[in-house]
Amino acid sequence: MIGGQLKDLTGGLGEEKPEGEKSEAAAKGMTQEEFEQYQQQLAEEKMERDASFAQKKAERATVRSHFREKYRLPKSELDDTQIQAAADDVELPTELAKMIAEDNQEEEHKQSVLGQLTNIQNVDIDQLKEKAQSTIEDLKQSAEKCEVM
């Protein structure tokens, strides 16, 4: 009676398993070989999940670093390490790459001479002529009033 209570208090520390207890594999209803295969399969699945997770983290880091470059923001060392950890097999997602290519084409077009000409064509030339003529007339009137000239 006292021995049982003492075991409950100590939590069974230092106790050896009686011979009647089953091994972990037998407790799960498997043979030792099946249990080892099961453990190996679990380890492989965990490694695959970890690799997939690292890949996704690296892809996200790539996207973040792209936007940091585009908007000239400071680089993050964490993103660089995540990309390097994925063994540099990281690419931008295809949809994002298409969007970026379209944005680059639009920016190049806006910066080109033709892009500037299209902006000029949107301006009303008659209105510009009227403003220029009125400005010249104002200058002539102020020049007539000037005593130096």
Image: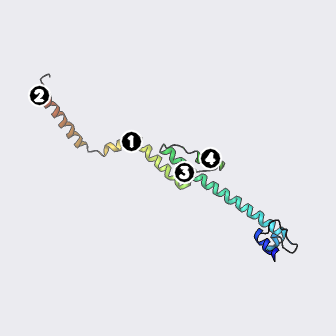
The amino acid marked with disc number 2 is Lys
Q: Earlier in the sequence, mark 3 or mark 1?
A: 3
Q: Would you say the residues marked 3 and 2 are in contact, meaning their CB atoms lie under 8 Å apart?
A: no
Q: Where is residue 108 in the image (x, y as percent from the top left)?
A: 44, 43
Q: Is mark 3 on a helix, strand or loop?
A: helix
Q: Where is residue 134 in the image (x, y as percent from the top left)?
A: 17, 37
Q: Mark 1 points at which residue?
A: 114
The amino acid marked with disc number 1 is Leu
Q: Is mark 1 on a helix, strand or loop?
A: helix
Which mark is on residue 145? 2
How far is disc 3 from disc 1 in space, using C-alphas?
Answer: 31 Å
How far is disc 1 from disc 2 in space, using C-alphas?
Answer: 44 Å
Q: How crowded is mark 3: few (under 14 residues within 10 Å), some or many (20 or more)?
A: some
Q: Mark 3 points at which residue?
A: 63
Q: Earlier in the sequence, mark 1 or mark 2?
A: 1
Q: Which of marks 3 and 2 is nearer the N terminus?
A: 3
Q: How crowded is mark 2: few (under 14 residues within 10 Å), some or many (20 or more)?
A: few
Q: Mark 4 points at which residue?
A: 81
Name the front one of labels 3 and 1. 3
Residue at the location (35% across, 41% down)?
117
Q: Where is residue 138 in the image (x, y as percent from the top left)?
A: 16, 34
Left or right of 44, for residue 97: left
How far is disc 4 from disc 3 in space, using C-alphas?
Answer: 14 Å
